[in-house]
Amino acid sequence: MNVMEIKVVGVIGAGVMGVGLAQNLAQTGHSVMLLDISDEVLKRAKREIKNNIRFQGFFQKDKTSSNPDEICDRIKFSTDYQVLREAEFAIENVTEKWHIKEEVYKTIDSICPPESVFAANTSAISITHIASVTQRPVKVIGMHFMNPVPMKPMVEVIRGYHTSEETIATAQQLLSQMGKESIVVNDSPGFVSNRILMLTINEAVFLLQEKVAEAAEVDRIFKTCFGHKMGPLETADLIGLDTILFSIEVLYESFNDSKYRPCTLLKKMVDAGLYGQKSGQGFYTYNKI
């Protein structure tokens, strides 16, 4: 199978994941269109990309650039979906709310070239369900990137019911260009990583709610006993507690299984705006950039 090199990529959503993706893609020589709903969000995204490059250094040194201005010059920051008319590949990173994702896919389906591949960077929503609202289900695939994107070498790739082998090969080609490997799994809500991870985090929050242990103690057990680099509550703060809640709710609704029932404390923290690192407060306190 002859797969063409991908040069132009649209990234929809300029949150934590979208910023990391745009940076990683631009660092590996791609032209990027980063979209979001407001200029304010995009200005913050540009600032974060430059800060990430300056203070964290650049990754995969054999394949990437570390000049902040040069990298940002490869990124077109826009609120207009029409820029995606040039996209050979589009990666969606919007919030885990179906009514929002549905509108995004209907919009990009009418704008992107027919040969463009759509990748859902979703935490839990079925790729087959996403593909059903497009006119190109064979070209829809899941690409579950881990945070922070530029530092993580592995991506969970999800095959929807209609996803073609050519689409899988194209996605793997793009990931290879980004300096990443992939593991291909079949479609199921939560896939492999989040079907396990969300249960772990949710149970850790229950332990906190029941006062079995403090957050630092829960995380320390995972790091020292199991050799994990981060504990489940630190991981939740990194991902965002709102995303965690959305994901566990999708699993609960999808499987109708009480084991996915979201912890009351998790709901309360999200209601209070305690999202983790991105808000400055979650299970731990952070200094916002």
Image: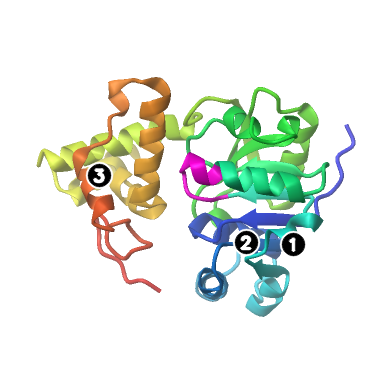
Q: Determine which residue is flagged by label 3.
A: 266
Mark nearer the N terminus (2 vs 1):
2
Mark nearer the N terminus (1 vs 3):
1
Q: Amino acid at mark 3?
A: Leu
Q: Is residue 263 left or right of residue 98?
A: left
SS at mark 2 in the image: strand
Give the Cα distance between marks 3 and 2: 30 Å
Q: Please state the horizontal and vertical placement of residue 112, each as a whole percent of the image.
A: 77, 49
SS at mark 1 in the image: helix
Nearest the viewer among 272 and 239 is: 272
Q: Please state the horizontal and vertical placement of residue 210, each as a whole percent of the image.
A: 11, 38
The residue located at (35%, 61%) in the rendering is: 277
Given the current orientation, which residue lies at the most extreme right position? 2
Q: Determine which residue is flagged by label 2.
A: 35
Quarter where residue 288 is shown:
bottom left
Nearest the viewer among 83 and 261 is: 83
Q: Which residues are magenta?
A: 93-101
Category of crowding for the residue at label 3, using alpha-carbon neighbours closer than 10 angstroms: few (below 14), some (14–19), many (at least 20): many
Quadrant where the C terminus sits is bottom left
Nearest the viewer among 107 and 267 is: 107
Q: Please state the horizontal and vertical placement of residue 230, each as a whole percent of the image.
A: 35, 48
Residue 228 visible? The answer is no
Q: Amino acid at mark 2?
A: Leu
Q: Determine which residue is flagged by label 1.
A: 83
Q: Amino acid at mark 1?
A: Val
The residue located at (71%, 31%) in the rendering is: 137
**Magenta includes 94?**
yes
